[in-house]
Amino acid sequence: GGGGGGDANGAVDGPALEGCSPVLVYALKRLARGLGSGRSGARQGFALALTAAFTEIPLVSLPDGLKLLKSSLEPITQSTKGAEARDILMGQLFGIAALVRAMATRFKSGDLPLDDALAFGASVAEETSRLAASKAYLAESAAAVVLELRAALGAGMGKLFDRSPALTEWITTPASKAGPEVVQLCMELWPYLPQKVRERCECVPQGGVKAKDWAAVFRRDRVETVRDALMESSYVHPRVHGVWDGLIKRAVEVPGAVETLWDVACEHGLFTSGSHQRRYLGFRLFSQLLPLCEPEAVPSLFSHGFIRCLLNNLNKEDNYLHAAAEECLESVVAYCKAKDTPQQKRLSVIAALQRLGPNRFDKVSKRNAVRELIGGLSVDDASGYMRELMGIFVHAPADGAKRAEGAPGGELVGNKRRLWALEQAVGLWPKLPAASQATLVKFLVTHAFYQSDPDAAALKKGKKKSAGLIEDAGVAPLAEPLDGLREACAVRVSSLLERNLKAQRASSAGKDDKPAETKPAKKGKKGKKEDSEEEDSEEEEAPKPMDVLVDILLSLLAQPSALLRDVVEHTFKAVAPAVSEASVVDMLRVVMARDADNRNAGGEGSDDEDGGPLGEHDEDDDGDDDEEEVGGGDSDSDEEEPGRSNGDAEAMDLDFGGSDSESESEESEDDAPFDEKRAAAIKAALVKAGALKDADDDDSDTDEDPADAMDDDAMFGIDKLLGQAFKSRREDINRKKNLMRATRDFKFRVLSLLELYAKCQPASPYLPGAAMPLLGAMQDALMAGTPQSSALAERIGGVLTKSVCHAKDLPSGAGAEPVTAESIAGELKLAIRAAAKPAGAGGDAKGFAKPATAVAMYLLRVLEAVSRLEKKSGEDEASPDAVSAYRDALEVFKTNKRCRLKAPFFQSAFERHPPLAAALLPDLAALLEVGADKESSRGEYLRAEGAKLLANALSLGRRRSPAVGVAAAKHRDVIGSAVAAAIEAPCRNNAARAETAKLATQCMEALGRLSPDAPLSTVVDADAILNAVKKQFAVPGMPPKGVNSLTRACTLLGLVAPEAVPGAAVEPSKKGKKEGGASGEKGGKKKEKKGKGEKRKGADGAKDEGKKVKKSKKQKA
């Protein structure tokens, strides 16, 4: 708290506090003391509580509240430190503000008369004015309290000035001595000021000006009067004082007020002062004024002093205001790039930034702000900017003329300024529409080859056309035809026309390349129909341009070049919104393609590249055959090995000294084409040398070694052929390894494109269809079992969880192909099946459960949204397809022992989609009755998991999901009987008994919270629960946690729990046997090891002792 002292200063007198209880008096004093706390947020909390207390407790009067503040907070003495004095003063101000808000509530409800409110308001005004005069940092908060008082009293605020001399003296401070708070109070309280007080206020217009005549407030002389006071507002740095909010809000409503306020208060006030804080305030005010002002006021905001200060601080990074200047320029660029920024405003900003001349702002500031803004112009913006540049070219001032204030084009005058405008206009050519391009060409032709004649006002009618051209483009008063500007116009229009002519020739050349079409004289209806069908088929066969571009990008992505990959990624990011479904399928096909070492893993019946491991072959396999499926690949390959052709083995069996299995495995891995000519040549050489018998001599029964019949010449004759064979074999192996490495690298790069596409287009209709193929590719990679494939699987999992399934937007075109409820429901069932089955070469693979769960959650979210669009379900109803899918999942979870689904999988779905939990309450309750008639570990596990899921679903509550409350009321009999069955079910493990009892009690508590108006005994069958508890307590050995839980359950029903039979004494041998399953056996082994160690130590010790004895004998000898 803010320190005691209230009791030392004397108790607070007053009839209200005397009638309060001691607890209330202590609470009020404690709240008042807490206002002086310097801890962050404490003062606000105590003030809020004090407001509520004085609002809700009419026994405590508001004047007593002021006395309470004075007596509770410590007095400021000479020994009080500066920080403590600040906290005490701020505490008094916060307490007064709390009382004012309490007064507003009482006055509005009619509990406080007007006279009492005025009397209390006068006391508050006096105290607040005193605090504002004591310390400068309290003035802004004190002014806010006075404005709160104005909002509470309304029209009665005018009567307060006669009762509060301190407030009148504060508000009538001379302008030369006034602070920003005086200006703020004068502006806000202007309509309520009495005539005598208004005449003494120098901060409001005089001379019979009516209140709220804001045009008079923003006259130049009036703003100059309060300029010094406004400049003092920088003491609240880095914040912007509240006086500026009111001034800016009213200035934007008065024509010309923004220009006057900026020029007087900022240009000739804040930016001319030597204070960094005031210049920083100027930057902040500019960022606030730019979005609010009209386009006509933009040149005034980009004043000379502001531009100079901005450039000076942008030029050097060690300047004090460098960061503030950067932030200001970034806000300007961001505002101009915003889609809702008016075109005229954007063009005015660009012209104002170029006032210093072409590219000078970018050169001095070392930023490309102007170039970036010009490059981001739209077609309409470019046309408007071109018109403005044409006006600059026509009306450029002469060399001796004075530059117009705020005119774009800057300090350049005469021909230099015209040449700058000409370059800018020609540079906009690619962004201009055809009409604007024609206007620009007319403008350039007119100034290149024509002269204006002022005496040709009345000409023949035949020359009206040329007069219209001049009126349309405008003509600058250029010199002779040989003038440099005319030559520049001629050169530029020639280059533009040449560029246009080349474009036309290119387009016409593309048309001429097509074969000429011959038209028959007459055609019947049938002939026309056939021709139209042929044209349609040709159009269908022709690939789309975007698909061709993506194919090119994929081909470039396969190249081993970091620069190409960077170019491909940036290009793909730019064209991502136009990527078609075929392109997405192409990228998925690359990721799903099997590696070179994994193409025959499944034998002859394996899926091809386009198939998925989760989509087709899972349909034919049962959940109980997962382990057989995982190990089936190896058995099939082993069976196929002996079945290879004997002829090939005889011809190519060159692995001398190697095992048969190694040669066979290498042959199975080699995908190189079989060179029959080379094999025949090697075989012929071996036969010729006598190292191999001919195939015709296979009938001989001799088992002689062919090498025994070879002489030295025959052995050396085949060395060259053997060297070539080994070299070819090594090259084939290296080629295959390089191919495998390149294939995996290519997959990683394509995955980067898919990740980029998912981030750039979260609402793409092709993302839901891409989730399952990616999950299938991940399972294929895990089943390969190699470190490289594991890294690929991890990367696919990251793309799924962080990008594809992280998209929160509803796919565009939902409700139509390919995003329909039927298709998404099929994908969801496949995702749940994938999450339920083991993945990887060894059963469960680490990292597969999380992506599979993420895919299921993503598809569930899309399915719920699409079902609402197709009106298959209401706002508070679950999708029927989703309910069916998760009901099947619960059935698999209940019946299949090898199911890998866990409780968190269902909990995440229920928390994100409560209506789904409401629809599955009977199925969850059925889990509590599994195996309730006999002892089994499987039944104990399912009952505990079911109770956990049921308690989680019921705890969602009626507020978050009314459907849960309705479903619980509908199925409460089923839920009650299931809870009773779970409590009564026998258990082998005492820990499982206690846990099940605890979870069942939580289900009852959640069920009771759903029906707060009715006793729990009317919601469930109390007798069934009591009988179940009795039966469970009759079995000895229930842990204390279980006893407490079931006792709690009986208490909730208003019943008396029976006594639990204490646990029977366990024999030491049985206890050691039970505990030895985990720790006992280990402990026994440790003891045995220790005993052996002692024996060894003893033997070693004896040995050592013997050595010592022998050594001593030798020494004696």
Image (cartoon, helix red, strand yellow):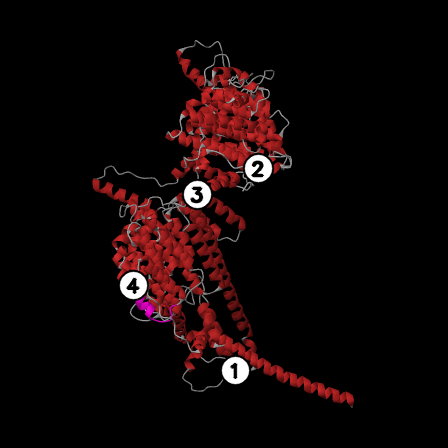
Mark 2 residue crowding within 10 angstroms, few (<14) / some (14–19) / many (20+): many
* Residue located beneath label 2 in the image: 74
Q: Tell me which numbered mark, 3 or 4, is placed earlier along the sequence.
A: 3
Q: Which residue is mark 1?
A: 707
Quarter of the image where the C terminus is located? bottom right
Looking at the image, residue 1060 sits to the left or right of residue 527; the answer is: right
Task: Please tell me which of labels 4 and 1 falls first in the chain.
Answer: 1
Q: Position of residue 341 (x, y in %)?
A: 45, 30
- Numbered disc in front, either 3 or 1: 3
Q: Are marks 3 and 1 in contact (CB under 8 Å)?
A: no
Measuring from the top left, give residue 880's x and y in whole percent: 27, 52
| Residue drawn at x 65%, y 86% as measured from the top left | 1102
Query: In the image, is 81 to the left or to the right of 259?
Result: right
Q: Which label is found at residue 1026?
A: 4
Q: Are marks 4 and 1 in contact (CB under 8 Å)?
A: no
Task: First in sequence, mark 2 or 4: give its number.
Answer: 2
| Mark 3 vs mark 2, CA separation in Å | 69 Å
In terms of secondary structure, what is the magenta stretch mainly? helix
Q: Position of residue 543 (x, y in %)?
A: 37, 46
Separation of marks 4 and 1 at Cα, in angstroms: 91 Å
